[in-house]
Amino acid sequence: MRAIILAAGQGTRLAPHTDDRPKCLVELSGQTLLSRQLSVLTALGVEDIVLVGGYRADQLPGHEHQVIVNPDFATTNMVHSLFCAKEALDGSDDILIAYSDIVYEARVLRALMDSQEAVSVAVNTEWRDLWDVRMDDPLSDAESLRLGPDDRLMEIGRKATDYAQIEGQYMGLIKVAAKWAPKLAGVFDDMAKLPRYEGAAFGNMYMTDFLQQLCDLDWPVYGVKVAGGWLEVDSVEDLAVYHALAAESELDHFCKLF
């Protein structure tokens, strides 16, 4: 398996921690988010790793991994960064697409790697417990995610108005089977013809927008349900909550740091 870690953004909500470094190099309990993710990948035998950088890309560990730079990182989003690395989507291996502001247990990655579907999306079924400690109103932040009876992904990334619309939360981890990986670029190129998608300009399309388009095109996209074992570090408030939980030996309830 080849991993593509999307690490181009500055992460302004994590300032001042990101004033002089990319978001993925912010530390959680003494280690950077990136180093924690790389440790899990290596432990499960994933050594072919591509980093897509942008903001302060010079700080990424290029001596160990290939670094590709999204020169338009300040005006584009995750999907654009992914296709800056489209040569890695050559069909020679399964692809793991990962956000860089997350940490997760090995069991989360193992569950995704075990999936044999064309496109597999990690889904946190215990998301509510985590959102309850991160914010006062989880519904204000959580996005819709609906699965069919066979766990086929039906809807993702839309504004939820009721908890019934949320069967889990997307974890920023996607596996694409090798033979399907080269086909992603065609979908992306076709979406460039749309002036806007779900209200976002093409360059600023979210990854959930792209996944929803795959679903709408009847791609076989499936959810892989995992109970916890994952953290998103999106803001200084998140970081403070996690550090407080770690100090009280309660962070393991949500994710056991590797």
Image (tube, helix red, strand yellow):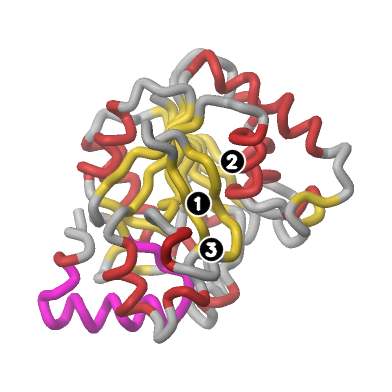
Determine the main secondary structure of the stretch shown in magenta.
helix
The structure residue drawn at horizontal position 16% and vertical position 81%, both measured from the top left corner, is 247
Residue 26 part of the magenta segment: no
Q: Position of residue 245 (x, y in %)?
A: 20, 79
Mark with earlier residue (2, 1): 1
- Give, as a three-letter code, the residue at label 2: Leu
Is mark 1 in CB contact (under 8 Å) with mark 3? yes
Q: Secondary structure at mark 1?
A: loop
Mark with earlier residue (1, 3): 3
The residue to which callout 2 is attached is 211
Quarter of image, res 256: bottom left
Q: Which mark is residue 22?
A: 3
Q: Secondary structure at mark 2?
A: helix
Q: Position of residue 189 (x, y in %)?
A: 79, 31
Foreground of the two, 149 or 30: 149
* Stretch of the chain drawn in magenta: 231-251
The residue to which callout 1 is attached is 60
Specify whether 228 is left or right of 69: left
Name the mark nearer the viewer: 2 or 3: 2
Residue 120 appearing in the image: yes
Q: CA distance from mark 1 to mark 3?
A: 8 Å
Quarter of image, res 81: top right
The structure residue drawn at horizontal position 55% and vertical position 72%, both measured from the top left corner, is 20
